[in-house]
Image (spheres, helix red, strand yellow):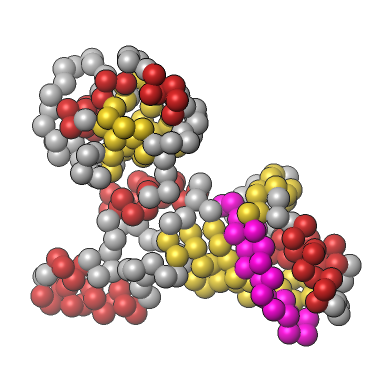
Amino acid sequence: MTGILPITLEDATKVVQVFLYGGKEYVCVMKLHGDVKEEQIKPVLKEFEDEIYQRPPLRSSVKRQLRTRRIYYIDYLEVDGRNVLFKVGCEAGTYIRKLCFDIGEILGVGAHMQELRRTRSGPFTETSATRVTLHDVAYWFGEWEEKKDEAILHKFIEPMENALVLLPKIVVRDSAVDALCHGANLTAPGVLSVGSGIEKGSILGIFTLKGEAVALAKALASTEEMLDLKHGAVAGLQRVLMPRGTYPRVWKTGSGA
C-alpha cells in the first residue's frame, strides 16, 4: 500500500488515538476473477455505500470477529479488462481487501485487491500543504542539522493542532488551562465556547483562545446541555497534550477547571 501515513513526534504521539476515529479514503485497483460488463459493476459498488458487516481477513492485526463499518461513498473510476479502479471513503478500520472480496462475491466471479493507495487519513490528504515524501524529510532534516534554523523544521513538520481539526472543540478560559494540564476535568465555568454537534460520550479537543491544544476529553454532555450548564463537569480528560506550567496556575487544590 502507498499514500498518506501520518507520523507523530514527541508529545504529538498523544494524539495518535485521534486517527482511530478519523475517516479514510483510498484509491483501489480490484482484480476480477472473471469477465464482467461495466454496466454491472457500477450498481454493485453503490450497494456497499452503507453500514456493512466485515470480519477481518486471516492476515490482520485484530481479532477476527464480525463488526460493522460504514462506507461513505464508492466512486467508480474506470475498468481495464478485469482491473477495476474505484475510490472509496470509509470509516477507520475498514478492510478494503475484504471489501473487494465481497464485491467479487456479489458479481459472481470473485475478486481480490490488486493495488491500494491511501489518499486521505483524517484531516490529511495528498493535497495537504506540507505533505512530504521520506526523501523530502531526509533532505530538510539534513539542512536543519547544518543550519539549526527552526524555520526549516516547519517545511516538513506540522503543528500538533493540525491533526485535531476534525474533532469537535471546546475553547476554555486561560484561568482553566493549568488545572486541565494537571488532570482536572473541565467544568462549566471554565468554558468559553462549545462547538456544534457534540454528543455525550464523543471524543473532543480542548483548546485555548489562541488555538493551542490543551487536552483530549470525552464529552459528559451534548452541545445543547453544555450551553445550559452553569456548574458541574462537562468533559472528562482522556489525554493531556500541553505541558504543565505553560499557563500560570490560578487554581486551588481540589477545585475543577
Q: Quadrant of residue 67?
A: top right
Percent of width and height locating residue 45: 75, 64
- In front: 232, or 140? 232
Residue 211 drawn above or below residue 26: above
Q: Residue 126 vs residue 108: left or right?
A: left
**Residue at the location (23% across, 16% down)?**
255
Q: Quadrant of the C terminus?
A: top left
- In front: 102, or 123? 123
**Residue at the location (84% across, 71% down)?**
40
**Tally of marks:** 0
Whether residue 78 is in magenta: the answer is yes
Percent of width and height locating residue 23: 53, 53
Q: Is residue 182 visible?
A: no
Residue 162 drawn above or below residue 135: above
Q: Is residue 66 visible?
A: yes
Percent of width and height locating residue 154: 22, 66
Q: Quadrant of the N terminus?
A: bottom right
Range of residues picked out in magenta: 73-95
**Residue at the location (11% across, 32% down)?**
248
